[in-house]
Amino acid sequence: MGNYNYKKGISAMLCCFLIWGFQPLYWYLCEGMDTFFLLACRIIWAAVCCLLLLKIQGKLPQLKAAFMDKQVMKREIPAMLFMLADWAIYLWAVQHGRVLECSLGYYIQPLVVFTFGAVIFKEKLSWRHLVILAIVVVGIVLGTNGFGVPYVTISLAVLFAIYAAIKKSLTIDSIVSTSMEIIMMVPLALLFILFFRMGDNGMASVDFTRQMLIMGSGVVTAVPMLFYAVGVRNLPMMTTGICQYLSPTIGIFCSMIMGEMLTRDKLVSFYFIWAGVILYVLNMFYEERKKNHQTA
């Protein structure tokens, strides 16, 4: 079973994916705010929260050491750029009523990550994986009937897959790593606000309520990172992989609350994606069981 603390791990993962799952409602509360101004503010306050978390955990020396390591920086800079693109597309999509496309993207993310692993890192790809991927591709193609070209879905899945591929070779603490990426975004965020968002589409529009929402955006960004890091340390990767499907499932309910319609055409796409996800999870169990029998 390994040295896992399932109670602690599951509790942390549930907190993490519940926050991530309900995040669309938080960004919905920020309706009327410019997407890219909100993104810049989210980066700044998330960086503040990350630094506080690292201070509490005594990991600031690790952060400093990571910034001084040239090999780490070679990976973290491109990782930061892909995270920034992912955040920008996600926020834009939520503010434009495309939460269902985001959920679809997060359902297929693990499958796209796995595919990248097979292509880039030459990980083993069986006929079962090819069948699962074919089902998912059919779901995406059929999604064009309900979503048009689901570029939000494809963009989020591919961006995260590239991000995961870059992060695969990093061995530093996960909170330190993600904090580095967010902190590196801060100069870009500050310059963007200073040169492009000082007027009515930015700083001039910030009242007390908006200021509280902006500050809160840092909390809802940084806190799930802490829960995720705790969960990963206390759970097998298979359990973590299954837990992550909670977030896009909650996202579907959030989309309905926000007035997005789950039409028949959209449902057909989801049916294929869900079928692919279920088969992927079952295959994970099968391969884990087979590996345990071989090592017994």
Image (cartoon, rainbow, N blue to C red):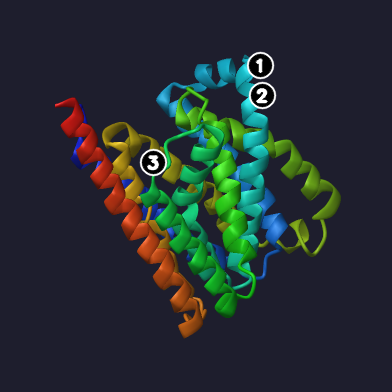
Q: Are marks 2 and 1 in contact (CB under 8 Å)?
A: yes
The residue wearing badge 1 is: 70
Q: Which of 62 and 190 is in front in this view?
A: 62
| Extreme residue toward the left, this view | 296
Q: Where is the C terminus found, in terms of image quarters?
A: top left
User: Which residue is at 52% across, 79% downward?
Assistant: 260
**Dot placed on the residue nearer the N-terminal end, 2 or 3:** 2
Q: Between marks 2 and 1, how big is the CA–CA gap?
A: 6 Å
Which residue is at 72% across, 44% downward? 189
Residue 28 on image: x %, y %? 55, 68
Q: In the depicted view, which residue is nearer to us: 209 or 30?
A: 30
Q: Which residue lies furthest to the bottom in this view?
A: 264
| Residue 152 shown left or right of residue 234 in the figure | right
Q: What residue type is labelled 2?
A: Lys
User: Residue at left 47%, top 32%?
Assistant: 175
C-alpha gap between disc 2 and disc 3: 24 Å
What is the three-letter code of the residue carrying label 1? Lys
Q: In this view, does 145 lie above or below 234?
A: below
Q: Is mark 2 on a helix, strand or loop?
A: helix
- Secondary element at image label 3: helix
Question: Which x, y percent locates residue 244?
Answer: 38, 51
Judge whether residue 247 can be spotted in this image.
Answer: yes
Rendered residue at 19%/26% (across/down): 295
* Left or right position of 95 against 264: right
- The residue beneath circle 3 is 228
Indicate the position of residue 48 as horizontal and vertical percent values. 57, 37
Residue beneath disc 2: 74
The answer for how far apart the CA atoms under marks 1 and 3 are is: 26 Å
